[in-house]
């Protein structure tokens, strides 16, 4: 159904706050935007920004020093603002649903306030365990199918032998969970990007979806200069492409490509870009933004103004 036909079919109905997706019955752990996204999406695509709540002491800790913990968190908030603006710009060029895949699970309200026009999904699901069984790392399939926590008793106390805990899943498991959940919700193409590349051009995000349009392409990656990747795009759950690779190492991409080759998958690569994880990366970003502040306005303002120690856990 085209966007024009959808509009015609809804002329007798009150306008919906968000576009009606096909198929819409079950979005799984995906939470709809609070406000309408920038553009309607009838392509059944989604782009996920892997994001962490910018709290001092847990965000961009490898930038301390030269930054303080508070300044590193404040800079990461600027990264988020710039990356989300890039995603909005790309969505005006190529149709997809903008999504924030967030952590920790309690950060939902923060990200809802930061980007009310984005879908939301936690990077991991709550795990249910008993005091008699040791906790185990949930797989994407088990996390997605796990029942909700049992209701509290009338007294308000939790069940005696059962507690709700959150396991710190490895990045690969979290990627598997969010990419699979988005595909299971009816999307035919899903792309995930990091939130550490504030100057990433929106055209690269559009190109990722265009490459996935090729029926011969199984996956697309955006290589990082540090040996990892800033983007992964798939049409099926990635499985061992993400779960069998040791993340945060200089061989992430090469190890991933070796697995893809062994599985007979056709992988397409985007132009290389960089993320900001070290003092050297921060210097590169400062140099780039000194010449082109429009590429990441929020980050540029932070780097050219006195650093603030204001907490970034609240907007």
Image (cartoon, helix red, strand yellow):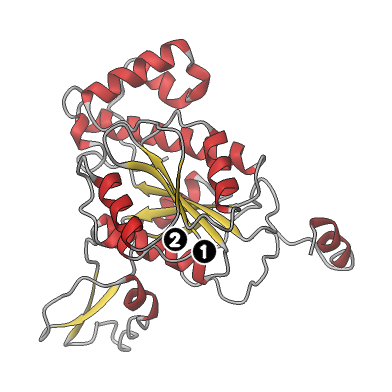
Q: Quadrant of the C terminus?
A: top left
The x and y percentages for residue 240 are 30, 63
For mark 2, give the secondary structure.
strand
Q: Which mark is residue 31?
A: 1
Residue positioned 27% across, 55% down in the render: 171
For mark 1, give the secondary structure.
loop
Query: With 78 as the anchor, is 310 left or right in this view?
Result: left
Residue positioned 35% across, 81% down in the render: 146
Query: With 263 as the anchor, is 138 left or right in this view?
Result: left
Circle 2 residue: 121
Q: Quadrant of the N terminus?
A: bottom right
Residue positioned 66% across, 58% down in the render: 43
Q: Which mark is residue 86?
A: none
The x and y percentages for residue 230 are 38, 41
The x and y percentages for residue 122 are 39, 61
249 or 303, nearer to the observer: 249
Height in image: 189 above or below 209? below
Disc 1 to disc 2: CB gap under 8 Å: yes
Height in image: 166 above or below 56? below
Would residue 138 be seen by someone viewing this image from the given angle?
yes
Query: With 184 as the anchor, is 20 left or right in this view?
Result: right
In the rendered image, which quarter is residue 148 located in?
Answer: bottom left
């Amino acid at each position: 159904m085209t966007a024009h036909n959808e509009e015609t079919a809804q002329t007798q109905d009150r306008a919906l706050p968000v576009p009606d997706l096909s198929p819409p019955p079950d979005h799984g752990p995906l939470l709809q935007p609070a406000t309408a996204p920038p553009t309607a999406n009838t392509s059944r695509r989604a782009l996920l920004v892997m994001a962490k709540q910018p709290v001092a002491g847990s965000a961009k800790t490898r930038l301390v020093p030269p930054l303080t913990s508070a300044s590193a968190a404040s800079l990461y908030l600027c990264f988020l603002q710039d990356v989300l603006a890039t995603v909005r710009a790309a969505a005006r060029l190529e149709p997809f649903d903008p999504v924030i895949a967030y952590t920790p699970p309690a950060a939902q309200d923060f990200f809802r306030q930061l980007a009310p026009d984005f879908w939301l999904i936690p990077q991991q699901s709550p795990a249910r365990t008993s005091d008699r069984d040791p906790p185990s790392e949930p797989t994407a399939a088990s996390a997605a199918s796990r029942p909700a926590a049992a209701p509290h008793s009338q007294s308000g106390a939790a069940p005696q032998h059962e507690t709700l805990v959150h396991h710190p899943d490895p990045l690969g498991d979290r990627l598997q969970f969010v990419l699979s959940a988005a595909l299971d919700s009816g999307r035919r193409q899903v792309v995930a990007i990091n939130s550490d590349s504030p100057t990433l051009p929106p055209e690269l995000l559009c190109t990722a979806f265009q490459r996935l349009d090729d029926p011969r392409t199984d996956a697309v990656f955006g290589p990082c200069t540090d040996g990892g990747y800033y983007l992964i795009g798939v049409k099926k759950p990635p499985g061992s492409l993400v779960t069998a690779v040791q993340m945060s190492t200089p061989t992430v991409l090469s190890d991933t490509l070796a697995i893809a080759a062994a599985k007979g998958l056709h992988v397409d690569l985007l132009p290389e870009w960089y993320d900001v994880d070290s003092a050297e990366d921060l210097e590169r970003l400062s140099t780039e933004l000194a010449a082109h502040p429009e590429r990441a306005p929020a980050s540029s303002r932070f780097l050219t103004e006195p650093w603030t120690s204001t907490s970034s856990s609240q907007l």
